[in-house]
Amino acid sequence: MRQRLRALTLILCLAAIMAICAWGSGTSTITEIDWASVQKVTLDWRADSAGTVDTVTTKRYTGIIWRVSVQPDTGRLPLDNYDLVVYDEDTVDVLDGDGANLDSLTTYNLTPVSTKTIETAIMGSTLRFVVANAGSAGCGKVHVYVR
């Protein structure tokens, strides 16, 4: 009985260590929601030791990038002047550079439609999120609204 308890304790400790190590190596979770005529893509990210995240949606989107909300995590702030690029499958930055040098204490609501002379349209495209210069374990959230 004691050997089984020791073995179970050892397994649980190893699982906890693996979970902690995996969390510290850069992670992201993408949530995709369709609601009426709007699709919302949420990226919840934590940078790796190099301060980067690079991930792609599984779903494809068609429409206009209506709004992009960028929120630093107040518990684990990214470094000041971190960068966010959101690429379509044609490797076009749908933010057109507006995700560069973001302040670590500011929440941004980027509206590519109202600030550009050409609307940011995507057709049948996945979205690739690239975060850089965020510092080790810096965290944040990005919401992309496609209409």
Image: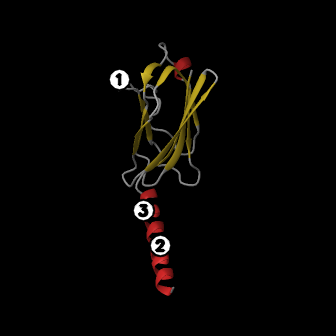
Residue at the spot 44% in from the left edge and 34% down from the top edge: 58
Residue at the spot 43% in from the left edge and 31% down from the top edge: 127
Disc 2 residue crowd, few under 14, some 14–19, many 20+, Cα 10 Å = few
- The tag earlier along the polypeptide, 1 or 3, is 3
Marks 1 and 3 sit apart, C-alpha to C-alpha, by 34 Å
**Residue identifier under label 1:** 90
- The tag earlier along the polypeptide, 2 or 1, is 2
What type is the residue that disc 3 sits on?
A: Cys
SS at badge 1:
loop
Q: On residue 21, which mark appears?
A: 3
**In the depicted structure, whether residue 93 falls above or below residue 1:** above
Residue 86 placement: quadrant: top left
The residue closer to the viewer here, 16 or 54, is 16
Disc 3 residue crowd, few under 14, some 14–19, many 20+, Cα 10 Å = few
SS at badge 2:
helix
Q: Are marks 1 and 3 in contact (CB under 8 Å)?
A: no
**In the depicted structure, whether residue 10 falls above or below residue 119:** below
**Residue identifier under label 2:** 13
Marks 3 and 2 sit apart, C-alpha to C-alpha, by 12 Å
